[in-house]
Image: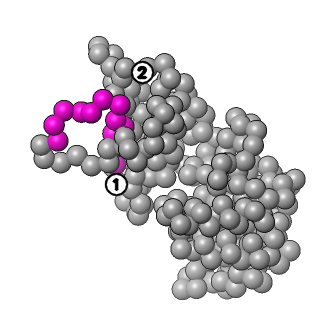
Amino acid sequence: MKIAITGASGRMGRMLIEAVLAAPDMELASALDRSDSPALGTDAGAFMGVKTGVTITDHTDAALAGCQVLIDFTRPEASMVYLDACRQHGVKMVIGTTGFSAEERARIQQAAQDIAIVQAANMSPGVNAAIRLIELATQMLTDTDIEVIEAHHRHKVDAPSGTALAIGEAIAAQLGKPLAEIGVFTREGHTGPRQPGSIGFSTIRGGDIVGDHTVLFAGNGEQIEIRHRATSRAHYADGSLRACRFLADKAHGLYDMRAVLGLSSGKQSA
């Protein structure tokens, strides 16, 4: 498969480049970066001392020529530009960017009418396995208070993380209510007693924490924690490549990592 990667000079972009170069069934076809990146014009493998023959560019249309899938871990405004270009050129997408607005999510759904897309708040197979366990625990532990605690590095710009929100959505679905109705994202001052059935969120930002998500089920006399801790970004890259392979025979549609991992059979609901 011929793969294009955005954010090529960033931490995740470099991890993806390294993963694609190591994959026997994939070829790094293009590497894209923002127009003010000092990496423009350099070889995409320079950071690892490898000559790939692929030059980092900001010319999206030219970069997509001949590509089959574009992997995007950038920011919502950039993702929308890449989305439009992929739709125009018939290139499939794997989107790991988080922080989309409702309008931007709607644009992704519309684009999926023409191209195949995997979009997930977290591409990690382990995180998605943890979410499944969290759903099962929510079904069983009906009388507990639920808290979602997440920690990331100091440079992360959105909070709560996309993964924390995905976890919250999964819990809320099991409780039969929308997250917007039962999620508690801030606590300050005299908050009063906890409301039954609510889902609390706590956010930590500091250092170089890759990603740490814990769901606490606090009951009377016992607590259960389900936790996923990332120690590198390699599993995000591995999951992204699995998503690319999943899209190989898909012409259009919006899918999530559950479909990629075989935990569900179909497309995301619109």
Residue 173 magenta-drawn?
Answer: no
Q: Position of residue 159 (x, y in %)?
A: 39, 56
Give the CA separation, mark 1 to mark 2: 33 Å
In the image, what residue occupies the spot 84% across and 59% down? 251
| Position of residue 197 measured from the top left corner of the image (x, y, whole percent) | 35, 31
Q: How is the image coloured?
A: one colour
Residue that appears at 41% across and 27% down: 225
**Side of 86 where 143 appears, left or right:** left
Kind of element beneath mark 1 = loop
Circle number at residue 142: 2
Q: Amino acid at mark 2?
A: Thr
Which residue is at the front of the view, 218 or 25?
Answer: 218
Give left or right: position of 227 versus 123.
Answer: left
Q: Nearer the viewer, mark 1 or mark 2?
A: 2
Q: Which residues are magenta?
A: 191-203
Left/right placement of residue 199 relative to residue 93 reads left
Across and down, in percent, residue 214 comes to 42, 36
15 or 177, nearer to the observer: 177
Q: Amino acid at mark 1?
A: Gly
**Residue of label 1:** 206
In the image, which disc is placed on residue 66? none
- Whichever of labels 1 and 2 marks the residue nearer the N terminus, that label is 2
